[in-house]
């Protein structure tokens, strides 16, 4: 018997018992739909994290002020100002593995334009910071070193601030007030989106470092900075750059081995890579959990196929009596099982895609349905049919023709 004829017989058998065939496929449909939807949600999460990682920049090391002890009281990490602009210059000139570095001072306050106002983060920095963060401007210009040296009262707006203060109006050239001090808007930064910590990176205003130190940040030492962003020359040199920075700052701050350092360094690339790996692991876990329902569906198919063999014992006997071989019977029942699972798989893929779209729209959560996940799900459903259909098919093929003809 050729395969085409076997396929026709299998389809006829499935059409004869439509409701049973549908109930048999139901487990596979639910399983495949769950796998597609869960993998789409997991892939969406991985995509969001990868975009957030890209928004931070590459090969970045963050240097933060550390804890200090004064009068018997010890402050926590970042509790004291221990980094200076001179430290930044030293890192640039004395650390061969460092490409560039930028100091940052941070404040917060109300930005006012006309009758509009918006409370936001105000960052004082140098032009190198935008190179480190790979952050361009969508309109206007960035500030230069001359703006830093001259403590110019100019600023760059993040997209969120620009939208809330100016709406659809181009803010370049307009005057806003920061802590009652007038600043000229010279540019609007490109959109960055959320950081891996969930903060809106576009909800910020950037001003020249010296301007912030003199006018916006309350400090007795205008040379102090809140943090230093450092970019290594390559990913391979990240560890070396971090080692050079630690050694240099310990020397500059006169820190011996017995004394805790008054600063700390954080390799952002390593931290973000761990977050990305965790997201991928979660995506695989979701897929694995959903796959359990496929196994349950496969067991259901095996049970129904065993019932079908029992019901069709006399039919099997007749076919054997007129010349059908054991392999023909085996192939017929295997074909029925594979057809059930693959048709169920196609329906499950469609439902999974619809479910992922619904989740995306209701929860505003990005979902990504890849061709790879669809292909894997489809062929996996066929594999389930082969695996769980083999045992009933073998029983059917092993029946004794005489006993099968006598079966009532």
Image: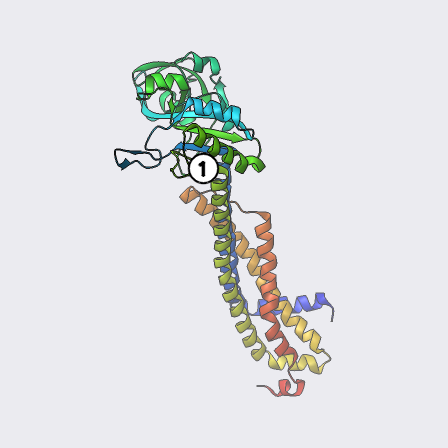
Please give left or right for residue 286 compared with residue 108 in the image.
right
Q: Is residue 367 visible?
A: no
Residue 256 lies, with reference to residue 343, above or below; the image says: above
Q: Pinpoint residue 319: horizontal percent, then vertical percent.
A: 68, 79
For label 1, the crowd category at 10 Å Cα-Cα, with few meaning under 14, some 14 to 19 and many 20 or more, is some
Q: Vertical placement of 36 versus 391: above or below?
A: above
Left or right, residue 329 beside residue 296: right
Q: Residue at x 62, y 72 (%)?
A: 390
**Who is closer to the viewer here, 149 or 108?**
149
- Colouring chosen for the image of the structure: rainbow
Picture coordinates of residue 161, whole percent (x, y): 38, 24
Give percent across and percent down for residue 366. Answer: 47, 42
Q: Give the residue at x 57% y 56%.
A: 377
The residue carrying mark 1 is 266
Q: Quadrant of residue 106?
A: top left
| Helix, strand or loop at mark 1 | strand
The x and y percentages for residue 407 are 59, 86
Q: Nearer the viewer, residue 258 or 364?
A: 258
Q: Quadrant of residue 65?
A: top left
The answer to whether residue 147 is seen in the rendering is: yes
């Amino acid at each position: 018997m050729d395969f085409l004829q076997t396929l026709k017989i299998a389809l006829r058998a499935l059409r004869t018992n439509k409701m049973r065939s549908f109930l048999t496929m139901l487990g596979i449909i639910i399983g495949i739909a769950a796998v597609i939807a869960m993998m789409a949600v997991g892939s969406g999460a991985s995509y969001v994290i990868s975009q957030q990682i890209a928004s931070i920049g590459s090969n970045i090391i963050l240097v933060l002020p550390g804890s200090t002890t004064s009068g018997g009281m010890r402050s926590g990490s970042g509790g004291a100002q221990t980094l200076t602009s001179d430290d930044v210059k030293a890192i640039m000139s004395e650390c061969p593995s460092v490409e560039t570095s930028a100091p940052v001072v941070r404040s917060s306050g109300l930005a006012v334009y006309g009758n509009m106002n918006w409370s936001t983060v105000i960052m004082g920095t140098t032009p190198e910071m935008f190179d480190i963060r790979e952050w361009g401007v969508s309109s206007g210009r960035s500030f230069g070193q001359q703006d830093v040296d001259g403590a110019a009262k100019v600023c760059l707006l993040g997209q969120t601030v620009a939208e809330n203060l100016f709406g659809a109006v181009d803010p370049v050239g307009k005057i806003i007030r920061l802590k009652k001090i007038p600043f000229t808007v010279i540019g609007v930064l490109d959109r960055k989106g959320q950081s891996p910590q969930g903060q809106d990176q576009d909800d910020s205003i950037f001003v020249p470092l010296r301007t912030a130190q003199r006018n916006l940040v309350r400090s007795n030492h205008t040379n102090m900075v809140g943090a230093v962003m450092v970019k290594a020359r390559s990913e391979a040199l990240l560890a070396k750059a971090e080692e050079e920075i630690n050694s240099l700052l310990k020397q500059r701050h006169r820190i011996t081995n017995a004394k805790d350092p008054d600063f700390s360094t954080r390799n952002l690339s390593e931290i973000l890579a761990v977050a990305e790996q965790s997201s991928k692991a979660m995506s695989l876990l979701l897929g694995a959990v959903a796959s359990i329902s496929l196994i349950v569906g496969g067991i259901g198919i095996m049970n129904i196929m065993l019932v079908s063999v029992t019901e069709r014992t006399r039919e099997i006997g007749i076919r054997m009596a007129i010349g059908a071989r054991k392999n023909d019977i085996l192939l017929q029942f295997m074909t029925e099982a594979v057809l059930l699972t693959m048709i169920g798989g196609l329906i499950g893929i469609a439902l999974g895609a619809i479910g992922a779209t619904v989740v995306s729209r209701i929860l505003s959560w990005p979902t990504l349905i890849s061709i790879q996940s669809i292909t894997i799900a489809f062929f996996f459903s066929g594999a389930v049919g082969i695996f769980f259909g083999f045992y009933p098919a073998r029983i059917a093929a092993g029946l004794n023709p005489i006993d099968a003809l006598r079966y009532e």
